Image: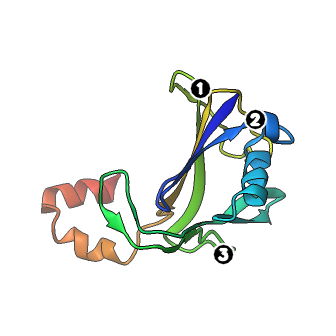
Amino acid sequence: MAVSFSVVGVFYSTQVDLTKVQGNTVGEIMQYLFRVDPSFYYTSIVFDQNTIVNSIGINHLKPFKGRTGIPYPAGFYRLAQSFTDPTPNPYSVWQYYLADQNGIRKPVQGNYSFTKATVQDGWSIVWRLVTICNAPNTLAKRMRKLIPADQQKALELA
């Protein structure tokens, strides 16, 4: 009875025996890993009455190779979200995906906290940090020079 757990960007992947976890939510699995794996670290915050992941870090004690074979030195690898109030542009948030034992992604509602999302034996959990633009940013003016004039006009009318 195991669940696959991985975090993109900090080079972490492990199997979690669900019989050892005090529950089957993504949050309970993360709390379990935090207790039993000294290399796994995460923080969370409450935002708009939802608990969200703030940062995830992994302490690699030895040099290692990434999924594509690129070598990396030992050290602490940490990524953090930048979702604050007021919201910066762009901002980064942690996002998780669930997939069943056949690798078929299970839908997760955007406002459904990781503390409530449940998994089953054989499933996988994948965390990744995504960056979102919530408005045009400073690069937009420079990018317009690369767009032909007729397409610019169409964009302005839309």
Crowding around mark 2 (Cα neighbors within 10 Å: few <14, some 14 to 19, many 20+) is many
Left or right relative to 14: residue 90: left
Q: Position of residue 18 (x, y in %)?
A: 75, 35
Q: Name the quadrant containing residue 21.
A: top right
Q: Amino acid at mark 2?
A: Leu
- Three-letter amino acid code of the residue under disc 1: Asp
* Residue 142 point in image, percent of width and height: 24, 76
**For the residues bearing labels 1 and 3, Cβ distance under 8 angstroms:** no
Task: Please report the residue visible at 47 percent of the width from the left and 69 percent of the height from the top.
Answer: 62
Q: Is residue 102 left or right of residue 150?
A: right
Circle 1 sits in a helix, a strand or a loop, which is it? Answer: loop
Q: Quadrant of residue 83?
A: bottom right
- Mark 3 and 2 residues: CB-CB less than 8 Å, in contact? no
Q: Residue at x 87, y 42 (%)?
A: 22
Q: Residues within 10 Å of mark 3 (few under 14, many from 20)?
A: few
Name which of mark 3 and mark 2 comes first in the sequence.
2
Query: Residue sitting at 29 percent across and 56 percent down?
Result: 155
29 vs 156, nearest the viewer: 29
Mark 2 or mark 1, which is nearer the start of the sequence?
2
Residue that numbered label 2 is attached to: 18
Q: Can I make out residue 113 in this image? A: no
> Which residue corresponds to mark 1?
100
The answer for how far apart the CA atoms under marks 1 and 2 are is: 15 Å
Circle 3 residue: 86
Question: Earlier along the polypeptide chain: callout 1 or callout 3?
Answer: 3
The secondary structure type at the circle numbered 2 is: helix
Q: CA distance from mark 3 to mark 2?
A: 38 Å
SS for callout 3: loop
Q: Which numbered marker is on residue 154?
A: none
Q: Using the image as rendered, state which of residue 12 and residue 53 is in the foreground.
A: 12
Front disc: 1 or 3? 1
